[in-house]
Image: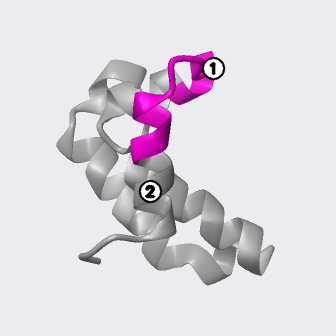
């Protein structure tokens, strides 16, 4: 998962965007903007969340690593 990608480029642009909407700002503040972009890009391309398991797992790991699960009271199922 190294190197530049379209998702990383979008995440960087979002961070630099003065007109970012509230959702973009909230995702950027989680520390998982790149992982979120990869996950949503995957779904957009494949139209099936089951085909995006690796991206979803990476997002979940990032979310937990940054302590967002405690902040938002997410539950592991």
Residue at the spot 26% in from the left edge and 44% down from the top edge: 64
Q: Residues within 10 Å of mark 1 (few under 14, many from 20)?
A: few
Question: Circle 2 sits in a helix, a strand or a loop, which is it?
Answer: helix
Closer to the camera, 37 or 61? 37
Residue 56 in the image: state x and y as whole percent: 48, 64
Closer to the camera, 40 or 66? 40
Any mark on residue 53, and which?
Answer: none
Any mark on residue 9, and which?
Answer: 2
Residue at the spot 35% in from the left edge and 64% down from the top edge: 58
State the predominant SS element of the stretch in magenta: helix
In the image, the segment drawn in magenta is: 12-24
Nearer-N-terminus badge (1/2): 2
Is any part of residue 8 visible from this angle?
yes
Closer to the camera, 44 or 49? 44
- Tell me how far mark 1 sits from mark 2, CA to CA: 17 Å
Residue 23 in the image: state x and y as whole percent: 60, 25
Residue 57 in the image: state x and y as whole percent: 40, 66
Residue 7 in the image: state x and y as whole percent: 48, 61
């Amino acid at each position: 998962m190294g190197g530049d990608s379209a998702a990383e480029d979008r995440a960087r642009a979002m961070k630099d965007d003065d007109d970012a909407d509230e959702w973009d700002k909230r995702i950027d503040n989680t520390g998982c903007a790149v992982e979120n972009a990869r996950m949503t890009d995957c779904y957009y391309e494949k139209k099936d969340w089951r085909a995006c398991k690796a991206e979803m797992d990476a997002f979940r790991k990032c979310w937990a690593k940054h302590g967002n699960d405690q902040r938002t009271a997410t539950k592991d199922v």
